[in-house]
Amino acid sequence: MSSTRLLQATGLVKSYPSQTQPAVDHIDLQLMRGDLLGLLGPNGAGKTTTISMLATMLRPDSGTIEIAGIDALRKPQAVRAKIGVVPQDLALYQSLTLRENLIFWGQLYGLHGAALTQRIRECIHLVGLDDQLDSCINVFSGGMKRRANLAAGIIHRPELLFLDEPTVGIDPQSRHSIIENLRELNCQGMTMIYSSHYMEEVELLCSKVMIIDAGKAVVAGDSSQLLHRCNCDNLEQLFLHLTGKKLRD
Amino acid sequence: MFLWWRHFYAFMLKELQLLRRDRGALLILFLMPVALVIIVSLVQDNILKVTGSRTVKLLLVDNDHGYLGQQLLHQLHTSDSLQVTCAPVSMDYAAAKLEVSAGNWQVGIYLPAGISQQLHQQAVTQVRNGFTGRGGDALSLDQLPPLEVEYFFDPAVQGGLQAGISGMLRQLITSTTLTEQVHAFQQMLPAYIERQVSSKLGPLYAQVLASSDLSFKSPVLDQPILQAVQINPVAMGGMDDFVQPTSVQHNVPAWSLFGIFFIILPVAGVILQERSHGIFPRILIVPGSKLVMLLGRLSAYLLVCMLQFCLMLLVGYYLLPRLGTDILQFNGQMSGLLVVALGAGITACGFGLLLGVVARSEQQAIMLAAVSIVIAAALGGIMVPVYMMPPTMQQLSFISPLGWGLDACQVLLLRGGTLLDILPQLLTMMVCFVGCLLLAWRRIAKN
């Protein structure tokens, strides 16, 4: 696997009019191809804002973002063809079938004909929804909807995939399935940024972690090295050690 | 370019698929306007046909049994809009009024006893006074009781119908009175001339006059020398053929436009769904022109609007005539009508886009859409013609997009206009669409 740099973000800053402090305050981020970065932080830390800026959904107030050698701020259209998003919301049309949803998203990314059909088949096989292709999303269980959401996010084979809490509210079996799917995708070369509150997931999946608190990067690096450096047994301990136990909301 | 076409097609297909699954929306978009146009056309067809169907029931209570009653009855029978019935002898004035108040008859006329004789007397007295300058040996008019033919309406009868029948009755009474006066004049003139000539020129001239025929033939009052004639107005486009307005000519375009504007509901609904379910951000990061995606989305709904409109035209052309109404006549303006429908659809889609962006929930969007469409329809003259509204409302009607569309249809269907004549209405619709689009875009950018 190539170890070239895929993502380089420097000095990202983003403020919202209603807040006195920046939501994201000078965050630097670097990802090599094949990396799977876990993005951790308390509620309101700035994870979603960071992901939104990296995915070109939000424009930072300052800073630079380069993805696959392309300036994302100057050429967002070129970058968007290389990235995918699996949002926390189930971004699917509930009254359409899985097939119709995947065709829609696939066509938007330029897929068509036999290539689209084949890709749909691959995606639903990966997420284990082979026999649900012609069922409407609104009859799916929570776990099935999450898996369908993942399928829609990877339909176009993105080089860089952003996942924002992709396993919220689902049963352990579905969560396990999604984790395994992501691991397989990562093995195939897909680079990912994975944001979650579930520490065990991040520990299982991610080789690198970044912990954000109050818009700032508290720590970033190889998860095992961080655990060793901070003398913690697991990521949850590390997280609480670095961010504290005080409630944030 | 190829990718743009795929984006256009993907959005168009997705919107049609969503609409296909929304049965409630389909009912509102297709069944509701059809039901409205059929019911309203049939109802108004009866009201607007003042002539042509005997629907107004009139009860004539003739206590006089004289020539006035016969004269009135004869003239009322010649009217196509009245179904005249003579009350039985046992029915008196109070009973007749009760019958009409109860709605068994729309109009009642009461002729009091002796009115024919009184009319004759007064006519003779008036003519005699005209000759002599004073009452002579007849009773003076001041001493005679006033003559009245009373008529009364069912309280439920509308003002327009009341005015029409009142006018007709007054005309009949005036005509009958005039006839009586002419007869009196006809009878008195020869004797008056003879007296005058005899008194001035002596008995010799009276003998000459007596041997001459000085009969006065009264004019034939059935052949008027002055009458009001209704003519067709000049067509805007200089057309020779001119279609008379019917309930179908008004209602089919009107309720079609009403139905088209309900496209606001699915347009706003899908956008709200995308906003609330996180689909919108996902769409935003798809590479490609957002304008093309928007056009693809709008094309789906415009296609539905055109299908709606064509269905309504078919109803007006094929179904309504089978139910007894007039046929919808296109005046060769089919292409113009389709352009108006397209303009209305574009305007509606623009408003739907804006509503989808600013509304905070689907319930809010539904309520706002429904209320605004009904208000726009009322202001625009869909239910009541603009010229019948109070002046303030007439001034407000210019803000109604449905009013622009209806006005354009009326120019094409009723006033003989062409596409050039409806350019102002079409441009206004486009400006409205662009305005809604800019506001929606600004709101999205702000969020």
Image (spheres, coloured by chain):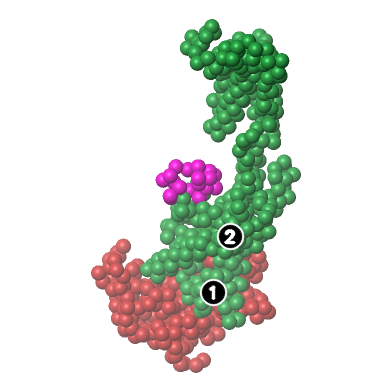
Chain colours: A red, B green
Residue count near mark 2 (Cα–Cα under 10 Å), binned few <14, some 14–19, many ≥20: many
Q: Quadrant of the C terminus of chain B?
A: bottom left
Which callout, 1 or 2, points at the residue further toward the start of the chain?
Answer: 1
Q: Is residue A159 magenta?
A: no
How many discs mark residues in the rendered view?
Answer: 2
Tag 1 subunit: B
Residue at (66, 51) in percent of width and height: B242
Disc 2 secondary structure class: helix
Crowd rating for badge 1 (residues with CA inside 10 Å; few <14, some 14–19, many 20+): some
Q: Main secondary structure of the magenta part?
A: helix
Instruction: Tell me if I can see residue A242 in this picture.
Output: yes
Q: Nearer the viewer, residue B438 or B276?
A: B438
Where is residue B121 shown, x and y percent of the image? 58, 12
The segment highlighted magenta reads: B379-396
The chain ID associated with circle 2 is B
Residue B426: assigned label: none
Q: CA distance from mark 1 to mark 2?
A: 23 Å
Residue B381 forms part of the magenta stretch: yes
Side of B361 where A109 appears, left or right: right
Q: Is residue B19 left or right of residue B318?
A: left
Residue type, label 2: Val
> Which residue is at the front of the view, B35 or B270?
B35
